[in-house]
Amino acid sequence: MSVLNAKIPEGPIKDKWTNHKNKINLVNPANKRLIDVIVVGTGLAGGSAAASLAEMGYKVKAFAFQDSPRRAHSIAAQGGINAAKNYQNDGDSVYRLFYDTVKGGDYRGREANVYRLAEVSANIIDQCVAQGVPFAREYGGLLDNRSFGGVLVSRTFYAKGQTGQQLLLGAYSAMNRQIGKGKIQMYNRHEMLELVIVDGKARGIIVRNLVTGAIERHSAHAVVLATGGYGNVFFLSTNAMGSNVTAAWRAHKKGAFFANPCYTQIHPTCIPRSGDYQSKLTLMSESLRNDGRIWVPKKMEDVEAIRAGRKKPTDLSEDERDYYLERRYPAFGNLVPRDVASRAAKERCDAGFGVNQTGEAVYLDFKSAIERYGKEQATVRGEKNPSKERIIELGEEVVRTKYGNLFQMYEKIVDENPYKTPMMIYPAVHYTMGGLWVDYNLMTTIPGCYAAGEANFSDHGANRLGASALMQGLADGYFVLPYTIGDYLADEIRTGPISTDTPEFDEAEKSVVERIDTLMNINGSQSVDSFHKRLGMVMWNKVGMSRNAKGLEEAIQEIRTIREEFWKDVRIPGSKNEFNTELAKAMRVADFLELGELFAKDALHRNESCGGHFREESVELDGEQKGEAKRDDVNFKYVAAWEWNGDPGAANLHKEDLEFKDIELKQRSYK
Amino acid sequence: MSDKTMNLTLKIWRQKDAKSKGKMETYPVTGISEHMSFLEMLDVLNEQLVVEGKEPVEFDHDCREGICGMCSLHINGEAHGPDRRVTTCQLHMRMFKDGETIYIEPFRAKGFPVVKDLVVDRSAFDRIQHAGGFVSVNTSGNTIDANAIPVPKDDADEAFNAATCIGCGACVASCKNASAMLFVSAKVSQFSLLPQGKVEAKDRVMKMVKQMDLEGFGNCTNTGACEVECPKGISLDNIARMNREYLKASLK
C-alpha cells in the first residue's frame, strides 16, 4: 500500500468535483479573518489564488522575486487558453477536453484532476471577460477561437500572441483590488528560501529581501507554492532568467514529494540558438502551426547550398521540400502535439537536414497561408483577378493581424523578415509537467503546504497540450484551491496567530543564514553562470529530448562533479547585506544542481517512452507506428513521487498507480 | 548569418544604494557579436567583472523577450536604446558600431528612485493600479456567459492595444516632465472601452489620476516623447481619451 493518498472523491467522474465541493468543510466569514495564508509566486496560479483567497476573507501575504506581481513569467505565454465552450459548434465538450488532455499527456495524468480542469475551464473565460480581459473577437462582437496541437476542435481563446499577458494582468488587477483594500500584503523583490514546519504542518517561510539582503520570517496557517516550473535547470530555456526551483525544492527537502521530475516539455517552435553567449531562448507560439508549414529540404545538396548561402529557402520548389509532419502524420499534420513535433524536428536535424550553421533548425513557412488568406480577402472585397502581389499584400495583412507581435519579435532577434522568408525554428525547453506531488485538494505531502499551477504535477501527465498551462494555472488559483484549502483551514479556526518566535523558525532562519554564509565565504574563481551553463549542457545532451541509460548514468556522475566543484569554487562578489544578484542566482543554482540529479535519476528509472520522455531503449520496432515512442503501461502506469532522503541520489521512490476508468488506455496515434 | 564582432567602451552609472551618490564609470568590452542582445552584452561584461573579483553591474531583467517589462535602461539618452518598438532585452548589438562609446544610465524620474546601479524602484506604478486599475468583480466564476455581451471588434481591439502596456516606465523616463500619463491612460482606456469597465469608469479615472499625482509624476505637455519611446507603441490617443474621461467624471 502506497503512502500516497490522492484523496480522489468517490462517484462518477462527472460528479466528483460537485460532490466534493458540497462535502468539504467551510470556514465561516468571521473566522476567515483570523486565518493567514501565504502565497509564494504571483503568476496565473499564485496571483489568482491570492486574489480569490483575499476576496473570501482570508488574510493573505503574497511574495514575488520580481519588482511587481505583474512580471511573473506567465506574462510571456503567447498562444491562448483552452476552454470547453463549444462556441464554434464543432462538437467540443467537457468530456472531449478531458479526453484530449489525458491522451495528450500520454496517459500519465490523474483522470479526476483533469476532468475537474476541463469542467471549470468554461468559467475561466466568463471570469476573465468580466474582469476586462480583451480577448480577440469576431466582427459580430463574439469571442474568436483558434486551434492548437493535438486536438481536432477550435477551443482556444486568445489575445493576439499575448494571451498570457492579458490573463496575468487580469489576475494582477484582481490582486490590486485586494491590495488596495489591505487584504493582501504584497512583498515584491522577496525570495522564499525555506519552508518552516511546526508540529508536522507548514507554518511559514523564510525569505530574503532582495533589496536589503535582510532575512525575514513570515508565518501563516497554510502556505501555497505557485512558483512555476524548473525548466531553467537546462540553463537555456524559454523561462525567464529568474525562474527557479528553489521554493519547491526547499519544500521537497522538508518532506514534500517531488513527482515525475523528468517530465519536461521541449517546445518545437523556438528561435534557434545563435552563440555561446546566449542567455535564453525565445518561443514562437504554437499557434503559428495553425498557419505555418514545417519543412526541410528533401535533398542534402540543397541543405548544403542553403548553409553555404548559395541558395535561399524560397528558391526551393514544392517538390524539393519535405513537409515531414504532413508526410508522417497525415491526420494531424503540422498540428501534432508538441512532443511529437519536437522529436520529428530532431530526427530530421540528426539526419543532417538542419538548415542553419549549427544544423539545428527547420523551416516554419507561411507562404501557403499568406496566399490562401490573400485570395480569401480578395474575394471578400470583391476584387476580381487580383495580381499575385496584391494577393500577397492582402494575405500578409491577415497574418499580421493574427501574429504581428510574434513576427516582429522574430525579426528583431534574427534580423530576417518572416513574411518574406520562412522562419527558422528548433525545439527548446519550455515547461515542466513534473512538480510537487499533490492530492486532489492540491495539498503536497506536507500538511498545510499546497502547490498550484506549473509547480504541481497533476494535470498534464507526460506532455502538456498547447494552451493548457494558462487554463490550469487559473483553474487552480481561481476555482480549485480557494475551495479545497478551506477543508484544511476549517480545523485551524482555533489555532490563533502563528508566532515566528519559536525554535522551528529559529532553526529555519539559521539554516538559511548558514547557507548564505557558506556561499559567500567560498570565494572561489568561477562565476555562478559558468556552473549553471555546465549543468545545462549535461541536462540538454544527456537528459534532454532523447535519453538512454548510459547517458543518464553519466549525467548523474557529471552533475555530482559539477555540484561538488560549485561548493568549492564559486565566486560571489559583494556582500550578503545588499542587492546582490550573484548571490540570489547562486542560491537558485545550488538547488538546480540537486534537482538536476533527481531529474536524471527519475529519467533513468522510467524505462519507457511516454510524452516528453523519450527513452531510446523503448521504441516501436514494426507496424504502422514503427519508430514512434513505446509506452509501457504494464510497468510504468504510475506517478513517480520521490521522497528526500538526505541526498538527491538517495531519494526514495513512491508510486501512485494511475487508474483509467473513463478513458481507454491505448497507444497515442496522430497518424 | 555573418558574425561581425566589435569592441566597445561602456560608460555605466554605478550607485551603491538608494542613499549613496552615483557616478559614471568606464568599462571596455571586446569581441561583442552583433547577434547578441544588449543584455547579453552586459552579461559578458559582468562575467568578466566577477572573474576579476569586481562587483558586477546590477540591472533589472527577467523574461528577456520583451513582455515582462522588467528591463529598463537609458542607453545613449534614449529609454530602451536606439531601436524602436523594442525593450532593452530585445535590442541587438547590430544597432551599434565597432569602436562606439555607449552611455548606460538608469531611468531617471522622481517617481523612480534608484535602488542600485541601473535598478530603479517602479512600485509607484503598482500603487496607481491599486487605486483603481481593476473591474470590481469577484473571482467566483459565477458571472454571466462570456458571450452574453457582444463587444464591437474595433472596441475590443482598441482595448487590447491599450492593454499591451508592459509597465516598464519608458514613457516616464522619456518625458521631460517625468509624466506617467501614457501608462495611466493605457489602463484607463482599456477599461473605458469595454462594457465591463464602463460601470466604474468615473470613479476609476479620478482615483488613478489622484494617485498618479501623489507619486510625484509630472504633467503632460503633449511633447509626444513617450509614444516615440514606448516599446509597445501605446498611442497618445489614450491620453486624450483619459482627459475626456477625467473631464466627464469631474463634471458629474
Image (spheres, rainbow, N blue to C red):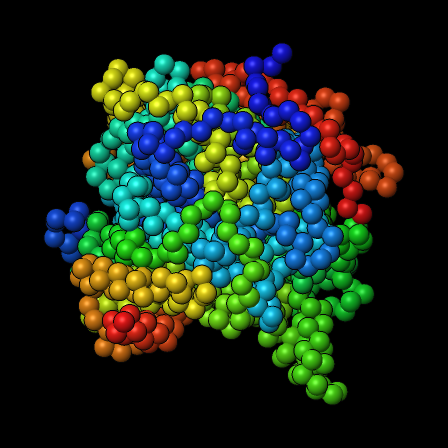
Is residue B235 placed above or below A275 in the rendered structure? below
Q: Is residue A539 left or right of residue A498?
A: right
Query: Residue sitting at 67 percent across and 78 percent down?
Result: A377
Q: Residue A605, percent across and down? A: 63, 22
Residue extending farthest to the bottom is: A384
Query: Residue sitting at 40 percent across and 65 percent down?
Result: B198
Query: Residue sitting at 71 percent across and 44 percent down?
Result: A96
Is residue B42 placed above or below A248 in the rendered structure? below
Query: For residue A512, what is the image quadrant?
Result: top left
Quadrant position of the C terminus of chain B in the picture:
bottom left
Query: For residue A574, what is the image quadrant?
Result: top left
Answer whether residue A118 is visible to the viewer in this image: yes
Q: Is residue A507 left or right of residue A267?
A: left
Q: Which sits in the foreground, B95 or B114?
A: B114
Q: Which sits in the foreground, A558 or A580?
A: A580
Quadrant position of the N terminus of chain B in the picture:
bottom right
Q: Residue A459, percent across and down? A: 59, 36
Query: For residue B250, what is the image quadrant?
Result: bottom left
Q: Is residue A223 left or right of residue A572?
A: right
Query: Residue sitting at 64 percent across and 37 percent down?
Result: A115
Q: Residue A547, percent across and down? A: 65, 33
Q: Residue A399, percent across and down? A: 61, 69
Q: Which sits in the foreground, A497 or A442?
A: A497
